[in-house]
Image: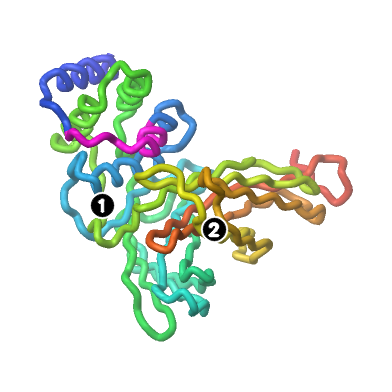
Amino acid sequence: MYKLFAVLVFVMVLSLMQTANAEEIPNWIKNKIKLWALDKVNEQGLIDSLVELNRRDFIEFEKLKTVQTTYNLPKYGETTFVKISGRTGDFSQTSPVTLIVTDPEGIRAEYTIPVLQSGAYSTSISLYYNSPAGTYEVSVYHAGRELMPYYFHVQKNSIIPPWLKSSAKWWSEGKISDSDFLHGIQYLIDKKILTLEVVNASQVDPGLDVTIQGQKAVRRGTAQNLEIHVENFGGNVGGATVFVRVEDYGENILEEFKGETDSNGDYSVSYEISKDFTDIETFLVYVDVTDGVSSKTKVFTFQVYCLCGEPNCKCRN
């Protein structure tokens, strides 16, 4: 009953709002929100889209300048990966960066992260159900100098009302206009129903949007195929340089690739998974893209498995 009432209130609010910004929402932002509405991407996909809408002045969050993004603590037995990425500003210097992560309780952890030829670095840290909630500070050091720090926030409860997905589905079906959808989101923000802390726009490089498609589970001895697509506000980006690094959970580099997107903004990677794995393994794929002006780093995760009865395969009861 509460969900139905909340949805009805949302519709009533939409009818009372004025016309939205005349500029059209970029297709890649629309697609990402629609995928979230159809349960094809997780909540972080919606958060990223809202941050981008804020940067483009379609909606306006409170100007909390310190936090890059917000994560929810996972359920018991699950793990959430927090992506930490940035650029050193030096395309020729590939010495590693040092990250010092300080959690809300003041406990520090140090990481040494490799730097790609583009000057980009990226890694992930794990959050568990009992990780401290609050703001985490990431200090970054490279080649004897301190770079811009990174902040992210961790909270226990979802920041997105569950009934918002219904309105997003209506929007994806054309039953709600762009204008109404934007005003509805802004209403939720203004009433503190939807909260999100965002970083100063000058610290974010949102010029490129990178999507990665691949298998989430791959049997050992077979191939993983990744399809990478690059867009910006003008459409597909051809000729962008793509760096791909595959790591295991212990940050051991297994494969590296470099290439360029074709005229449709696409770049493909295919590589064979070793037959040596004896148990389920988690892999992280870091994709760094630059067009010479803007850059973006994305992380894709997948698991490698073997079948019971195969040689050197650990079976779980």
Above or below, comparing residue 123 to residue 316 in the picture: below
Measured as percent of width and height from the top left, residue 281 is found at 68, 52
Measured as percent of width and height from the top left, residue 241 is found at 52, 59
Q: Helix or strand or loop: what does disc 2 sit on?
A: strand
Q: Which amino acid does label 2 sit on?
A: Val
Q: Label 1 vs label 2: CA separation?
A: 27 Å
Judge the density around disc 1: few (<14), some (14-19), many (≥20) Cα neighbours within 10 Å: many
Q: Which amino acid does label 1 sit on?
A: Val
Judge the density around disc 2: few (<14), some (14-19), many (≥20) Cα neighbours within 10 Å: many
Measured as percent of width and height from the top left, residue 86 is found at 41, 65
The residues colored magenta run 21-33
User: Mark 1 or 2 closer to N-term?
Assistant: 1
Toward the viewer: 163 or 293? 293
**Magenta span contains residue 246:** no
Residue lying at 35% horizontally and 45% vertically, measured from the top left: 233
Toward the viewer: 286 or 107? 286
**Magenta span contains residue 32:** yes
Q: Is 229 displayed left or right of 215 in the figure?
A: left
Q: Helix or strand or loop: what does disc 1 sit on?
A: loop
Residue lying at 36% horizontally and 44% vertically, measured from the top left: 234
Q: Is 168 displayed left or right of 65 in the figure?
A: right
Q: Quadrant of the C terminus?
A: top right
Instruction: Find disc 2 in the rendering and name its residue.
Output: 242
Q: Quadrant of residue 145?
A: bottom left
Above or below, comparing residue 273 to residue 159 in the picture: below
Q: Do the residues labelled 1 and 2 touch (CB within 8 Å)?
A: no
